[in-house]
Amino acid sequence: MTDSVGELEDKIIDINSRIWGDWRTMNDEEAYAPFSHVEKVFSMIVYMDMEIQNGGFEQWIWNPTGMYVRETRDGLIEIGAAKVAEMVDQAVTVFPGGFPGREWQERDRQVRALSDGARAKLYELDGPYADARYDLYVKSLRYWDEHGTFDASDAGNAGSG
């Protein structure tokens, strides 16, 4: 029997909770410092997904997780989620230089200055993203199974390696 999107999402959230332990802010470089590359990739993708589900690509880019758009996009390629990486590539074209600013104040100004057409372009990606979530979850979990720093079924100590 194949897991539903919701069941896959529950597994992903559980792994991410074990990576992060107690909630920390992600709006500075130090937040990810203790984590392995694999933990960073996994977590950035999880937070991208949560933000897009909650308010679309615009929200993901605007919120603190938006400072990691480049790294998240690279992580999507690394796990084999080329379809979602392509959506990110389309989304960032509405920003000067092809990517939003790293600092929140700059991204805030950029998002507020988006034209109606640019906002529509971001909004148009939300539907295809929803359709791609199952595949993204499968690839995320496969990536974790192959490279993760702890067994997803074990409540081991994450963030240590």
Image (cartoon, rainbow, N blue to C red):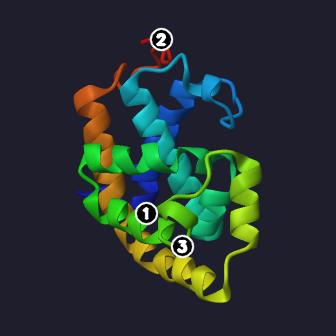
Q: Mark 2 or 1, which is nearer the eye?
A: 1
Judged from the image, the secondary structure of the residue bearing numbered disc 3 is: loop
Tag 2 near tag 1, CB within 8 Å: no
Question: Mark 3 belongs to which amino acid?
Answer: Val
Q: Which residue is at the front of the view, 13 or 122?
A: 122
Judged from the image, the secondary structure of the residue bearing numbered disc 2 is: loop
Label drawn at residue 88? 1
Q: Is residue 114 above or below residue 24?
A: below
The residue shown at (41%, 12%) is 161
Q: Which image quadrant for residue 118?
A: bottom right
Q: Is residue 115 left or right of residue 88?
A: right
Q: Which image quadrant for residue 32?
A: top right
Q: Which residue is at the front of the view, 6 or 20?
A: 20
Judged from the image, the secondary structure of the residue bearing numbered disc 1 is: helix
Label drawn at residue 160? 2
Q: Name the residue beneath numbered marker 3.
A: 94
Residue 40, how many percent across, how many down? 46, 31
Residue 35, how many percent across, how many down? 49, 20
- Residue 60 seen in this snapshot: yes
How packed mark 3 is, by other alpha carbons closer than 10 Å (few <14, some 14-19, many 20 or more), is many
Q: Is residue 135 above or below residue 138?
A: below
Q: Which residue is at the front of the view, 80 or 117?
A: 117
Between the residue at mark 2 and the residue at mark 3, the CA separation in whole angstroms equals 37 Å
Q: Is residue 35 above or below residue 132?
A: above
Quadrant of image for the N terminus: bottom left
Of the numbered discs 2 and 3, the one sitting upstream in the chain is: 3
Between the residue at mark 3 and the residue at mark 1, the CA separation in whole angstroms equals 11 Å
Check the image and name the residue furthest to the front: 97
Residue 92, how many percent across, how many down? 49, 65
How packed mark 1 is, by other alpha carbons closer than 10 Å (few <14, some 14-19, many 20 or more), is many
Question: Mark 1 belongs to which amino acid?
Answer: Val
